[in-house]
Image: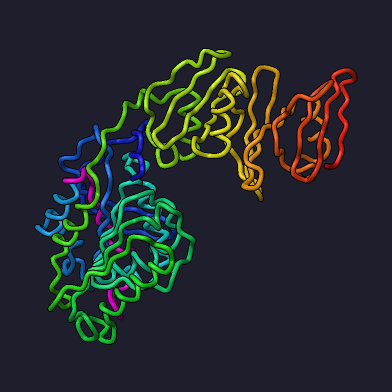
């Protein structure tokens, strides 16, 4: 499970409101928000419900926001401390197939993503607890657009896909969090051609195709539920949502927002916040070294801050993080001066301990070793082109008669001579 979002400074508590206008991406429509009974001391998730096609708003649940159907759906969301958001499609052309989500899926997708980003920011919603629920045309919109393209805003949750949900495959490569979402297609055994408009469309075929495509595209928790004897008008939408939401853990309690402050808070929020690092496990604590501070987070990160280096994270469980711990943390390499960065064949992270500067280099072939950038060997390595010259370090510096030596992956051995301060390089 993803870590819940830390409350965002300035976020306002969501309140129930209907017919709220929202404009983005050249489109304007409305949405309904249900927030009664939400506990703000816990992570607040969100259920988005996308209904089927219609010609008049009053013909759909979305056109009756105070009706029993959406009130019942909001009650199910509330059990998981989630608000319910019911947007109306920005499609305004009721001719042809009526008001739909799927006819301009890309444009409607742009509008929807802007809406969710606005609500998430305004109310501090937890994007690790997002549930997409859709029926008929809304189900198609979820599988053809929202889960298939630019879906990285979803950090956890799931989807209930009812009476449809086909797929042509992914438009954007999904990340691990999205591929791990529980996705359930619910479709009636009689929901074939002629069960709805257009008459040639089959929700049963769409659901089978969609689930098959998503499984082939690496989604690991897809399920097709065929409901005996049901056609397109027979679904218990609220009941199916209730059934699927049961798999979502209860909302966790959020830590005090006061635990995040200063430079650590600024960098934490700017680089992904709780979705990347998780929750703070405690307030900042002193390291006892060079005036530094550290703060742990639940997704296996620790932020370090010092007056000399600022605030930067270290990832535990990675090659660099493990080596940093084994070397003696800030008392050895000092404090990170940057976050870990990827290289074509590995990764690196720079550290500083007073006047000494270090670069930890990782590759699958060499493991993790550190180059002392402020030392004689490290200075020569930089002049030679860093990893593009001598390669990655395959050892740390080690003592030899009269100095220090270090081996590199392109076959070079660099030796620093104490008597002269010079560095010689050999192959071997």
Q: Residue at x 30, y 55 (%)?
A: 158
User: Is residue 70 shown above or below 356?
Assistant: below
Pick out the residue farthest to the left: 68
Q: Quadrant of residue 37?
A: top left
Residue 16 falls left or right of residue 218: left
Q: Is residue 52 visible?
A: no
Tell me where the magenta segment starts and ends, as one range: 79-100
Q: Position of residue 164 (x, y in %)?
A: 27, 73
Quadrant where the C terminus sits is top right
Mark count:
0
Seen from the viewer's position, the closer of residues 412 and 118 is 412
Q: Position of residue 223 (x, y in %)?
A: 28, 66
Q: Position of residue 132 (x, y in %)?
A: 29, 57
Judged by its main secondary structure, the magenta piece is: loop
Q: Is residue 347 visible?
A: yes
User: Is residue 236 shown above or below 302?
Assistant: below
Q: Residue at x 47, y 15 (%)?
A: 286
Q: Is residue 264 magenta?
A: no
Seen from the viewer's position, the closer of residues 235 and 109 is 235
Q: Residue at x 44, y 37 (%)?
A: 277
Q: Position of residue 34 (x, y in %)?
A: 20, 48
User: Is residue 288 shown above or below 183?
Assistant: above
């Amino acid at each position: 499970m993803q870590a819940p979002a830390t409350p965002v400074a300035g976020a306002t508590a969501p309140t129930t409101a209907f017919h709220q206008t929202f404009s983005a991406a050249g489109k304007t429509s409305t949405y309904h928000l249900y927030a009664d009974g939400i506990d703000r001391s816990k992570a607040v998730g969100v259920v988005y419900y996308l209904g089927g096609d219609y010609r008049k708003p009053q013909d759909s649940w979305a056109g009756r926001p105070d009706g029993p159907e959406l009130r019942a759906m909001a009650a199910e969301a509330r059990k998981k401390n989630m608000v319910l958001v019911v947007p109306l499609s920005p499609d305004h052309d009721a001719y042809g197939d009526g008001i739909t989500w799927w006819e301009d899926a890309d444009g409607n997708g742009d509008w929807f993503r802007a809406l969710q980003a606005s609500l998430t920011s305004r109310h501090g919603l937890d994007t690790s607890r997002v549930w997409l629920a859709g029926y008929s045309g809304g189900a198609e919109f979820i599988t053809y657009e929202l889960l298939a393209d630019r879906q990285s805003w979803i950090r956890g949750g799931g989807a209930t896909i009812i009476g449809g949900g086909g797929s042509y495959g992914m438009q954007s490569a999904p990340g691990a969090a999205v591929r791990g979402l529980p996705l359930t297609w619910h479709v009636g055994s009689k929901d074939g051609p002629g069960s709805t408009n257009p008459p040639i469309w089959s929700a049963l075929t769409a659901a089978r195709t969609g689930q098959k495509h998503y499984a082939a595209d690496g989604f690991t928790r897809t399920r097709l539920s065929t409901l005996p004897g049901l056609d397109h008008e027979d679904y218990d939408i609220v009941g199916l949502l209730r059934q699927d939401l049961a798999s979502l853990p209860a909302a966790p309690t959020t830590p005090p927002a006061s635990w995040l402050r200063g430079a650590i808070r600024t960098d934490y929020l700017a680089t992904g916040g709780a979705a990347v690092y998780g929750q703070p496990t405690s307030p900042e604590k002193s390291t006892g070294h060079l005036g530094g501070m550290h703060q742990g987070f639940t997704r296996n990160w620790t932020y370090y801050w010092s007056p000399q280096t600022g605030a930067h994270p270290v990832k535990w469980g990675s090659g660099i993080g493990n080596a940093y711990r084994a070397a003696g943390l800030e008392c050895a390499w000092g404090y990170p001066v940057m976050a870990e960065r990827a290289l074509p064949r590995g990764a690196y992270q720079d550290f500083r301990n007073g006047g000494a500067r270090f670069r930890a280099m990782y590759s699958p072939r060499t493991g993790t070793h550190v180059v002392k950038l402020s030392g004689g060997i490290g200075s020569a390595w930089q002049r030679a082109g860093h990893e593009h010259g001598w390669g990655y370090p395959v050892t740390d510096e080690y003592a030899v008669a009269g100095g220090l030596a270090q081996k590199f992956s392109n076959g070079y051995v660099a030796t620093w001579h104490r008597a002269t301060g010079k560095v010689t390089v050999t192959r071997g």
